[in-house]
Image (cartoon, rainbow, N blue to C red):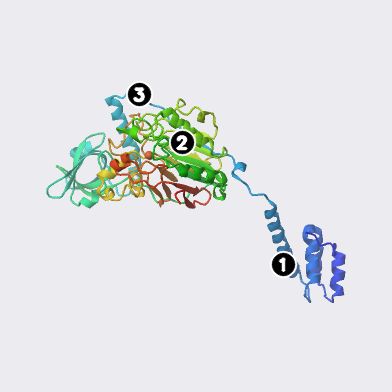
Amino acid sequence: MKDSRICNAKDFLSALIEKGILVDPKTFEAIKQLFETKKDIASLVANSICDGECKEISSAIIYQKIKFFQARNEKITIKKTAKKTRKDYDAQLTVRKNSEQRGKKDISLFRDYFVSRYDKIKKILMNHLDLNNLVSISNLSFSIRRNTDISIIAIVKEIIEAKTGTILLDVEDKTGFVRVFVKEPDLCKNVITDEVIGISGSYFSGGIIAKKIVFPEIPIPDGINKIDEPLKAVFISDIHLGSKEYIKSIEEKFLKWINKDKQTEDVKYLFIAGDNVDGVGIYPSQKDDLEIENIYDQYSEFEKLIEKIPEEIEIAICPGNHDAVTQFEPQDALDEIYVPNLMNYSNVHLVKNPEYIYLHNNDDADGMKVLMYHGYSFTSIIDVIPELRKRGLSNPEYIMKEVLRKRHLAPLYGSSLINPLKEDLLVIDEIPDIFQTGDLHSHCLKNYKGITLISSSTFQGQTSFMDRVGHIANPGKASIVDLNTRDIFIKNFMQ
Ligand SMILES: [Fe+2]
């Protein structure tokens, strides 16, 4: 856009004189500067002033006009720039490196496993302000005087309700065992066995009278982590391919949406949190519920679904309890024997369950952390916490908050099968930005202390097995997180 009627300082001055407008020395200098340093807009400024109604001129008017045309040019430049798409941004997805310490499952490994849990959570609790005068349990009887206020960090062995209403917690650390008397039951209302807690109270020869029970918890965040690039992530799980209750229309709508919808143009990451197929022999008489009875055929259908997702989307897939991998947690990633084709795709990342995944974490930026966990332990934990029993299965955010407070994905022994590695990898030792789970076939997209909580819905309708375990299907919802703004959205494929 050029206006060349006045194209130098001399012509501009002549035009002003013709209009009877006087030019003072400061304005003269501004006009000179205009044509020397702002050549791209000088003519536009001059013509705009001469064509206008103004009866006088000043350096201020010149600068005002320069500002106006510079801003307009910037807008024009922005319009001309093509919108960047996800193809223009490199994928930056890395998986946490854990040393492999698998060994023979003997009793000594279980001891190491629980010592690792204790040490990791103790480290978190030691910073807690409510735990003053921390001592080891073995030191209580030797060096602590009666009625002294002390704190301990211990693992809960047993919870007993006395006839008086007092709750007795039998707890231990690496040095010994002690009984804790909780006279106000509310203090320990969500405490469960096998979790590591802090206890502050007063010591006497028979044990400790608790004044406070401290969970390791998630601290109040300093800020919210985001990535610099305008990209989104989508979260789904519990696809259950092969089930008679598989809802094909969800798959069709999902694929259309992820391939062609405006809302997904900037989706760069897709997370699938387990139960990718319905599996075989997962529960008694499952055969009656299967549309596809062969496990290889189920995974073949799953591969076909994944292959229809745009290749510029990075896909992280962990297993669930219906997948054909070990049921001991941490579960291994899906095996080549079942998904040979997926091994050839560089955008597909087969990860363990649970797993930490880092996005856009590089030398210049911390990026974001996603914690994926299928969630098999949740049903059992919900069952032992009275507050969660009524509403926990259909409102997954409650159990998700609870395990975050306990800083462990399966604190209750037996809530999931344990793979006793030397390190307990189910401890939530890093605070995630996004915590994704599945298994309950319910859905939530909430926030807890800066962490986006996602329970990922399902592609499967209600089954007789779900009736038996008390799960109520809330199918067909994808959760979307804008990684640049942390805005959240739900796409409902059942509508
Ligand atoms: Fe499932």
Q: Position of residue 125 (x, y in %)?
A: 33, 43
Q: Residues within 10 Å of mark 1 (few under 14, many from 20)?
A: few
Spatial CA span between label 2 and label 3: 25 Å
Closer to us: mark 2 or mark 1? 2
Q: Nearer the viewer, mark 2 or mark 3?
A: 2
Q: Is residue 334 visible?
A: no
Q: Report the side of 398 relative to 342 (left or right).
A: left
Residue 208, located in which quarter of the rendered image?
top left
Q: Is residue 257 above or below residue 55?
A: above
Amino acid found under the numbered disc labelled 2: Ile
**Relative to 221, residue 64 above or below:** below
Distance of mark 1 from mark 3, alpha carbons?
75 Å
Q: Using a 10 Å C-alpha cutoff, classify the residue at mark 3 as few (fewer than 14 neighbours), some (14 to 19) or many (20 or more).
A: few
Numbered disc 3: secondary structure? loop
Kindly tell me whether mark 3's CB lies below 8 Å from ligand 1: no
Secondary structure under tag 1 reads helix
**Residue 317 tag number:** 2
CA separation in Å, label 2 and label 1 = 57 Å
Q: Earlier in the sequence, mark 1 or mark 3?
A: 1
Residue 420 numbered mark, or none: none
Foreground of the two, 350 or 176: 350
